[in-house]
Image (cartoon, rainbow, N blue to C red):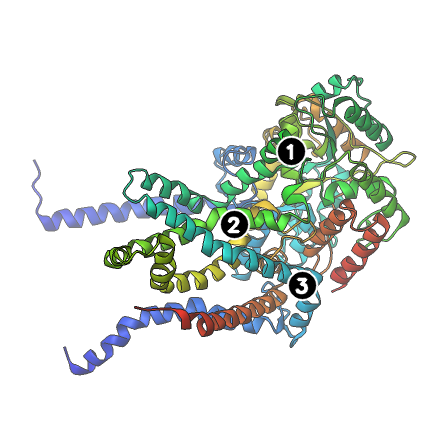
Amino acid sequence: MVEMNRRQFVAGATAAIGASMVMTGPARSADTSIEVSSTWGADKPFQKVVDAFNAKKLGVTVVNRFDGDYESATAKAGASVAAGRPPAMMITGWKFGYFAKRTLGARDLREINAAKADAIINSFRPSVHPLVTIDGTLIGLPWAMSTPITFINSELWKAAGLDPNLPETIDTKWLYENAHKLDAALKGKHPTYRSALALSNNEWTSQSFIQNAGGYIIDPQGGLALNSPEAVAGMAEFCAPASEGLWLPVSAKDQDAAFESGALAICTTSSTRATTFPLGPAKALTTKFPGMPGHARNMNSGGNFLAVYTKNKEQAEASLAFLEFCASKEGQTIWSQVGYLNTSVHDVPLINDFMKPAAAQLTDGLTAETIWPGKRGLEGQDVWRKWVSRMLLKEVTPADGVKGAHQELAGLISA
Amino acid sequence: MPSRLRSLAPYLFVGPAVLSVAIFLYGPLVASALLSVLDWNLLSADISFVGTKNYATAFGNVDFRTAAWNTVLYCIILIPAQIVLPLLLALMIHSVRKSPMQGLYRGSLFLPTILAYSVAGVAWSWLFNPVNGLFNEIFGYFGFPPSRWHTDPNLALLCVCLVTFWKTFGLNMLLWLAALANLPHELREASQLDGASPRRHFFTISLPLMTPTAFFISVTTFFHVLDDIVGVIDVLTHGGPAGRSSSLLYFLWQQGLRFFQFGPASAVAMIIIVLVLIVTWLQFRVVEKRVHYG
């Protein structure tokens, strides 16, 4: 047996630790670690995309950091940027496009690596390229896209004696007539029925109505276009069921809870609910979002893009490596499980038939949700939401509401 | 220890505390005051001095004025409720202090205080849900028409008050309980011997002896009300419908951390600080005179 005194033991141990540090040091530094500020936690499919990428051991380790909803994530990113340490990447809502580029400093992917950036964006349908093109630069990968569609409680629909074979494309005339029939047949007679309709009391579906009437909130050139007869017509049609007692405007959270429990007959909301609504107690059927009679449909979308914010060259390159995986068929197939639309050129099957109306709307063509321009543009969404509420509460007429919103928004956007 | 070092000792002991107060309290205060006269979003290099423009913008903003008025209403409703009702509950619990159930009552009533706002928000949203919430089901059973509760512009503020009260009364109740437990038994026995009724004993002996607690509760409740409603608004109404349940602090949070308008947000912060200082000064000038420190 080899005998060792204390001095020898300490010297040997120090040498062993030092050697191991020298040996593992290069191996550790070979892996570039990047953090993605995201709106999804570890239990969501985005984590599976991250895990699948990390499993490939490409020398880049991605860490998914859950930062709350779009607003919270953007606020935290803003604080990080102010502190001089922007997140390497962030899931950024479409609506923050201008803010991401002009204020947070989202990188032009082509500036990092033009060839890779072009390969990434060419994995997506040309129709979605404009959504991530701000000020002529490519500011991210179009990641999540949803669109509002119509969910119908099949049990209540049948109980009211209505035809369960829904048309593929519907308009408000058809929808409101059926809502009236539902109300007349079930009010006070059905144990779970409480309300005929909910169109989502937010800026998203009201934008759909305005666009389906031929108008815009912000036109494709980025100008405020709310003060138009089309916008007034869209909002008048949007508010009509609330005035007639068919729709009790509540928050999106309350609306979803009411629909899921079977108390609400018709609900227009994000197509991502196709992964839950039809499979729960509501046993929902789906069809397209209602168009406006006599007008061409012009539906909008919601969602987010994956943007790169880091100024560090190595981190930026590593971010592009992750984006390449996200744009691949493998990445898109894992991601599709969450219920967003497949905007890539890869052949990824729909996760269920309830997604068909949403996929059809994508094929028809989707605009972005309102991307609020201007230095104070982030306030735009809340201002518009406030005026939508005032119109739904009948505090102002749609004409006055649209005019008032236009004036207030014009002040914000030009600030 | 050398005498020179000994003379420095108090400063060394107090130093860290003073330093942390300077960094975390007075530092942000000075920064807010500076930001309130600048046009700067902290993110860009564009900084310009705008003088009182941010203050004028705040006062000219209809949403700020609505939030300010709502804050007054919140204070009028919640401050008396947060002082008086916890006292009544504390008296009831104190009256059963020898019962083994007292701990259960106290724990149950204090439970909402330690619940997360997000949990409370989910529970109350379910109760208030205008389409199929429990309240409407119960009221409907008795023939009342359904209410829109927190989505009704006339009820939203009251709903926030109700949830805020439910969420926060526990702390004041515990403070009152502690004050009641510390009242001298001899005085109760003496007043009983003199034939004083329980009501007379309470108003002429117990309450005056508890005025230091009452003063402390009245001062801290004012701050708590301003602060606590923000959490409830955030999980329940988001300031809606159409700004009817917003408050000054919620408006400030929106301006600063959602819209990155740090100039206007700092101006609102300075306005709030001035208002809080005025109210607190008045409380010390008017109420403290009635406090018996024994």
The amino acid at mark 3 is Arg
**Chain letter behind tag 3:** B
- Between the residue at mark 3 and the residue at mark 2, the CA separation in whole angstroms equals 22 Å
Residue placed under numbered mark 2 in the picture = B164
Label 2, residues with CA under 10 Å away: few <14, some 14-19, many ≥20: many
User: Upstream in the sequence, badge 3 or badge 2?
Assistant: 3
Quarter of the image where one finds residue A234: top right
Locate residue A180, reporting x and y percent.
81, 28
Q: Which of label 1 and label 3 is nearer to you? A: 3
Q: Nearer the viewer, mark 3 or mark 2?
A: 2
The picture places residue B154, in percent across and down from the top left corner, at 68, 49
**Mark 3 surroundings within 10 Å by alpha-carbon count, few (fewer than 14), some (14 through 19), many (20 or more):** some
Q: Position of residue A25 (x, y in %)?
A: 36, 47
Q: Amino acid at mark 1?
A: Asp
Give how far across and how far down residue A282 sits, in percent.
65, 23
- Subunit of label 2: B
Q: Nearer the viewer, mark 2 or mark 1?
A: 2
Instruction: Say whether marks 1 and 3 touch (CB < 8 Å).
Output: no
Q: Dot 1 lies on which element?
A: helix
* Tag shown at residue A256: 1
* Above or below, A83 relative to A3: below
